[in-house]
Amino acid sequence: MPVPPPPQGTRRALLAAGAGASLGLLGGCASGGTAAPALLLQAPAAQLPGTHQQDLRDPASGRTWRVWVQRPVGPVPATGHPVLYVLDGNAAFALAAQLARNDAERPPEMRPDAAIVVGIGHPGDAAIHPAERQRDYTPPPPGGSATAQTGGADLLLGFIARELQPRIAAAFPVDAQRQTITGHSFGGLFVLHALFTRPAQFTRYAATSPSVWWNQGQVLQTAQQFVQAHATAPRAFPSRLQLQLRIGGLEHAQAAATPARAAVQAERRLLERTTTLANQLTALAWPELRVQMAVLPGLDHGSVMLPGLVDALALAQQAR
């Protein structure tokens, strides 16, 4: 019988105790007491093998993004390597890259195609850049354009199309029919905006807890425009499109831990709106568009990011 997870407070206490025990091991593993941690912290910074990092300036917009690339580990598939583009690269790239490296250690009969992982983030060491991600991941208002604070999604999409995707294709044999982009929260909003406005730029879209509430649900209106624009077959998609949606089971007001958070979740209605969007797109029954949504029980907006990333990599590696 599976053992249920400990209550949240207990879980935090266990994590804290584990962290303390680890520090104790560091302190006692060598003579001299505190000398060992000091020497350890003077060692060279850790690096993820096979990874390259560069800050790239976009000539068109004048903005600079930090880009990471994890080389594929494994033979070249017959159709080329699948590519996974990961937003919020400062926080998520290393996770996705290590997941891809782990796949290379699986038995050959269970090993998926070796993927190229590309992180897109911002210069600096912070894991999250709130102002920059709001600037870059939100769509411009209807009939408007980007400002210094919001609405820059089309600028970033243009940079990826003009500068980044050609560089990856020039460096590696890639599979043009397995181009995936993934993002969480504002990043998930960006992924949906990309699908509904530039369905030919990628072939697979993975949105985790997308901020569909942004600007009075603007992206839901964009979804309706997408449906109307492609209502008649044949649809001008480069290949069959796939949309993967992931959301936490606790992302509704009744599951919120505090009244303040419940008020925010009630206003945003993230779970309800995302489910409605998935049902509407599924009901189209377009053979050129496959929609797959999952509600992950016991997870909130923050904790759903990691399993969403795991599923996004699996989506990227799926055979044609």
Image (cartoon, rainbow, N blue to C red):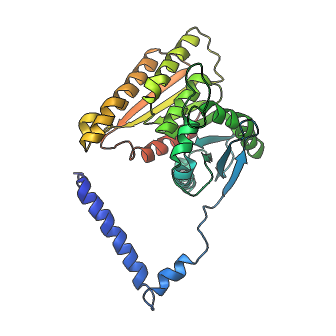
In the image, residue 19 above or below residue 152: below
In the image, residue 76 above or below residue 274: below
Q: Position of residue 1 (x, y in %)?
A: 21, 51
Q: Nearer the viewer, residue 142 or 313?
A: 142
When asked about the image quadrant of residue 164, the answer is top right
Q: Position of residue 9 (x, y in %)?
A: 24, 57
State the residue at coordinates (46%, 27%): 215
What is the count of numbered marks?
0
Q: Is residue 177 visible?
A: no
When asked about the image quadrant of residue 138, the answer is top right
Q: Is residue 164 left or right of residue 28?
A: right
Q: Split into 4 quadrants, where in the image is the C terminus?
A: top right
In the image, residue 225 above or below residue 140: above
In the image, residue 143 above or below residue 61: above
When asked about the image quadrant of residue 3, the answer is bottom left
Question: As drawn, which residue projects farthest toward the front?
Answer: 148
Q: Is residue 55 visible?
A: yes
State the residue at coordinates (52%, 20%): 222
Q: Position of residue 111 (x, y in %)?
A: 55, 48
